[in-house]
Image: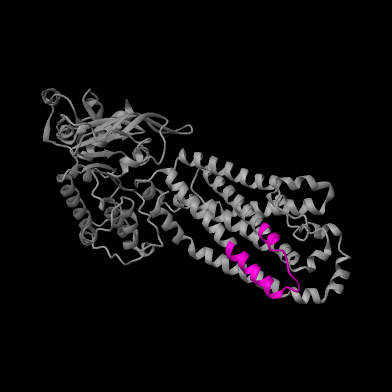
Amino acid sequence: MSAPVIDITDLTKFYGKARGIEHVSLEIGEGEIFGFIGPNGAGKSTTIRILLNLIFPTGGSARIMGMDVIRETKKIKRHVGYIPSDANAYASMDVNEFLSYCIRFYGKQKDNHRIAELSSLFELDLKRKIADLSMGNRKKVSIVQSLLHSPKLLIMDEPTTGLDPLMQANFFELLRSENLKGMTVFYSSHILSEVQMLCKRVAIIKEGKIIQLEDIETLRKKQLKKVFIEFGDHESKGNFSVPGIESVIAGPDNILSFMYSGDINELVGLLAGRKIVNLMIEEPSLEEIFMHYYQYNSQS
Amino acid sequence: MNRNLFLKEMRRNAFSLIIWMIVITILISLTMSVYRMFVENQSKIMGMMNLIPKGALQFKGISNFNDLFSVLGFYAVNNIIYMMVLGSIFAIVLSSNILLKEEYNKTAEYLLARPVTRSEIFVSKLVVLFLYVFLLNLVTALAGLICMELVKNEPFSIRAFLILSLYTLLLNLLFGAIGLFISTLVKRSKPVTTFSIGLVLICYFIYTVSKITESAAKIGYLSPFEFVNVDVINPAYRLEFLNLLYFTGISLLLVTISHRLYNRKDIYT
C-alpha cells in the first residue's frame, strides 16, 4: 500500500485555553475523496489551517505526501490546491490578473487553455474586478485558482457556499474527473448530502475530536435503521428505553419513530404482542446517521 | 525573496507612494517659495523672534535664530515636519499594514497556500518597504535640493544636506521597522493604522516637550527624533557614529525579531 497522502497523528491545537482540536489522527490514501464533516466550530478549519501551516499545532504532527507540514511546507504546497471557506481574493485585481498572479508562484507561465477551460465551466468573466463579483462568483474564482496548477491534493473548506445548484453540479463533475486523473480530495463541509454524494470515506469531528471514521457505505450499513411504527393503542416512549434504541420521537396518532442499531430479531421480539397498524424500517440518510452519532456521543 | 510577490507588492502600493511623494513635494516647494520673502524681512522677523522664548525654537534643533536665514537652515527646520514626521507616518503606516493587510483582507489564506515560505513573504515585503521609503526620501530630497538651488542667496553645503537626508531616511526606516514589529505582535487581524500614526506623533510630542522644557530634557531620549541632528549650519555637523548605531541597530533588531515572530505566528483570517 502506498504512503498516505495526508497523515495526521495525535494533532492538537489550543487557542490559549480554548480548544481547537484534540488528538486528531487521520490517514488519507492516494486518490481518495475524503469527507471531513462536523458543525461550525467542531475543528474542521483548525485542522486544515494546520495542514497549510497557517497556524501551528500545540501537539502532534501532520505530514502531507510524507513531508512535514511545518518544515517542508513549501515543497508540499507545490502539489496542493486549496479552496478557503472565505473567498476573499485581492479586490483590486481583475480575475485574469489574480489567476496569473496565482500560477506564477508555481514557476509556470499562465496556461490560457487551462484558464479558459475552467472559467468557461463556471461561466466566469475574466475581465471583471474581483471587488465587483458576487459571493458565488468569488467562490468560482477560488475554485479555478485552486486547480490551475493541477494539484495532486485538493483541500477544500466549505467549497460550495454561494454556488448555485447548477454550478455545484459542474463543480462535483470537475472533482470527479480530476479525481479519476489521480487527484486526492480532502473535503471539509457541514453539508452532509454533498459529502455523501462525493466521498468514499468520512471522518466526523465533534468538539475537536474525531468521533467516527468510516467508509460511507459501512456507515450506512452499520445496522443503523430508522424505524417508524404506528400502534393500534397508545404506547409510551418509556417502553422503548432499551439498549440499541436511540432518539425516540413520539408523533401524533400513536406513532413512534427511533433509530435502531441492534439485532433486528430483538426488535421484532420487543414488538411482539403489541397491536401494530403500520411498520416501516428504512435506511437512514447520512444526515440522520450523523445526527445519531452526535447525539449518541453527547449522551455518552 | 519571491519575485512574484515582490512585483505584486510594488504595484499594489504604488498609487499611495505617488500621492505621498506629490503631497510632500508640494509642501516643501510651497514652504521654500516663501524663503526669499522670509530673508527680505529678516530684521522684522528677528524682532518678533526675540519675543519668543528661546526654547520654543530650539525644539526644531536650531540653536541660533540666524541659522534660519540660511537656505539650508530654513530647509532643515521645515524638513522636520515634512519629511521626518510625514515620512515616518508614511513608513509606519505602510510597514504596519504590509503583512497584516493579508490577514484582515483575508488574502493570507491564498498567499500561504502557495509554494512560498514565510521568510520569503517577509523578505519580499521588507524589500518593498525599504524601496518605498527610500524612493519617497529620494524624490522629496531631490525636490528640496532643487527648491534650495532655485531660492538660495548664497551657496550651501551639499555635504550637510546629504547628512540631513541620510538622518531622515534612517529615522523613516526606524519607524518602518517599528511598524513591522507592531504588526507581528497583533494576534487578531485588524488594522493598526491609527495606533501607528499615534505612535509617531507621540514620539514627536515627547521630542518637542524635551526641547522646550529643560527639566524634561532627558525624556527626549525616548523618542527617535532626539537622535536626528538637524543643526546643519554648525560647521562641525556630521553623522554621529552613536546616532548611526542607534538607528541601524534598533532597526535591524526589530526587523530580526519581527521576522522570527512572523515565522511562528498563527495567521487568522
| Whether residue B268 is visible | no
Write the residue at 19% across / 55% down. A170
Quarter residue A211 falls in? top left
* Residue A91 screen position, x and y as percent: 40, 60
Q: How many marks?
A: 0
Viewer-proximal residue, A288 or B90?
B90
In the rendered view, tell whether residue B207 sits above or below residue A13.
Answer: below
Q: Quadrant of the C terminus of chain A?
A: top left
B3 relative to A127 in the view: left or right: right
* A93 magenta-colored: no
Q: What's the image's color scheme?
A: one colour
B146 relative to A191 in the view: left or right: right
* B150 magenta-colored: yes
* Residue A225 screen position, x and y as percent: 16, 32
Viewer-proximal residue, B11 or A209?
B11
* Residue A161 screen position, x and y as percent: 30, 52
In the rendered view, tell whether residue A106 sits above or below residue B33.
Answer: above
In the rendered view, tell whether residue A10 sits above or below residue A130.
Answer: above
Quarter residue B59 falls in? bottom right
Write the residue at 64% across / 56% down. B166
| Whether residue A246 is visible | yes
Write the residue at 25% across / 46% down. A151
* Residue B263 screen position, x and y as percent: 46, 40
Q: Quadrant of the N terminus of chain A?
A: top left
Viewer-proximal residue, A216 or A226?
A216
Q: Mostly what secondary structure, the magenta segment? A: helix
What's the magenta region? B138-163
